[in-house]
Image (spheres, rainbow, N blue to C red):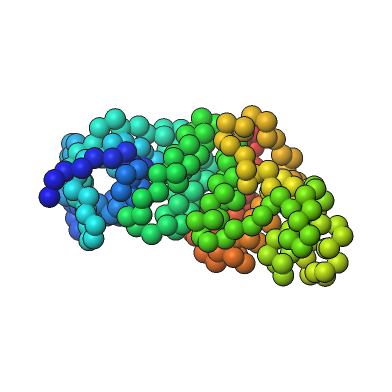
Amino acid sequence: MALAESKGLILFTRNHKEHDMLVKIFTESAGKQMFYVKGIHRKNHPLKSAVQPFTEAIYIGTFKTENLSFLNSAKAIHPFSNIQQDIFMSAYATYLLNLADAAIEDRIYDPNLYHFLREALFLIDQGYDAEIITNIFEIQILQRFGVIFNWQQCAVCGQANHQYYFSHKYHGLLCEKHVILDTKHYPTSPKIMYLVGQLANVHYEQLNHLSFKPQTKQELRKFIDFLYEEYVGIHLKSKKFIDQMKNWQDILEPNH
């Protein structure tokens, strides 16, 4: 089988036998692939730097349509070095990688998701607000899980304004006039619904214009957690770690 090459992002690695490794890579041209890398734990293996966590490279190997693919070499290796060295950055980056892995099946060609993920990692590595980047990623990737909302208008009358409430019953937003139709609507403020609508459509290059107060971040986090619990139903260890990390982040790094 002929060799192929593609840009790729390391999703995760898993040791296999004594010297080998299974490496899952999100490739730009062939979707997610599980690669077998033989002898990676041997001294001076040429692929060692290319399969480190939080790395992007051009990977060359045999890309199979079933079973394991095989990695031969790599070039243009770019480590996200700040993420690799920072526990807080790496926590959010790991969660985004896990979300992308969960969002689509293996070997599904999805260059848009690849670049969306790559840009998120790049910005976290550059020191942009990892929480806001994560919120944007979570909201915009919902459609990959088959969850689609109209964040711009009332689900009943179609009115477009900034005074919305979220209704599980109506699978979307309700305006002030129709919120009475759902007495069990989600208990958050119209401000949070407005911000979620902004995050659903914002581009990463607009990050400089986004700044949320800690209380607003907490409310956003709570609402997004509700969406994932109710509509997606995945429980990632990396997300649980972020939740735990928030409890001791200020102790370990008060100026972070």
Query: Can residue 217 be seen in this snapshot?
Result: no
Q: Residue at x 52, y 46 (%)?
A: 92
Q: Position of residue 77 (x, y in %)?
A: 30, 32
Rendered image quadrant of residue 130: top right
Q: Position of residue 82 (x, y in %)?
A: 46, 33
Q: Is residue 123 above or below residue 250?
A: above
Q: Residue at x 60, y 51 (%)?
A: 139
Q: Is residue 105 left or right of residue 153?
A: left
Name the residue nearer the viewer: 111 or 93.
111
Q: Is residue 176 left or right of residue 27?
A: right
Q: Residue at x 74, y 64 (%)?
A: 167
Quadrant for the C terminus in the image: top right
Name the residue nearer the viewer: 95 or 149.
149
Q: Residue at x 12, y 50 (%)?
A: 1
Q: Residue furthest left?
A: 1
Q: Is residue 64 left or right of residue 160?
A: left
Q: Is residue 222 above or below residue 250?
A: below
Q: Position of residue 131 (x, y in %)?
A: 60, 43
Q: Position of residue 217 (x, y in %)?
A: 70, 46
Name the residue nearer the viewer: 212 or 241.
212
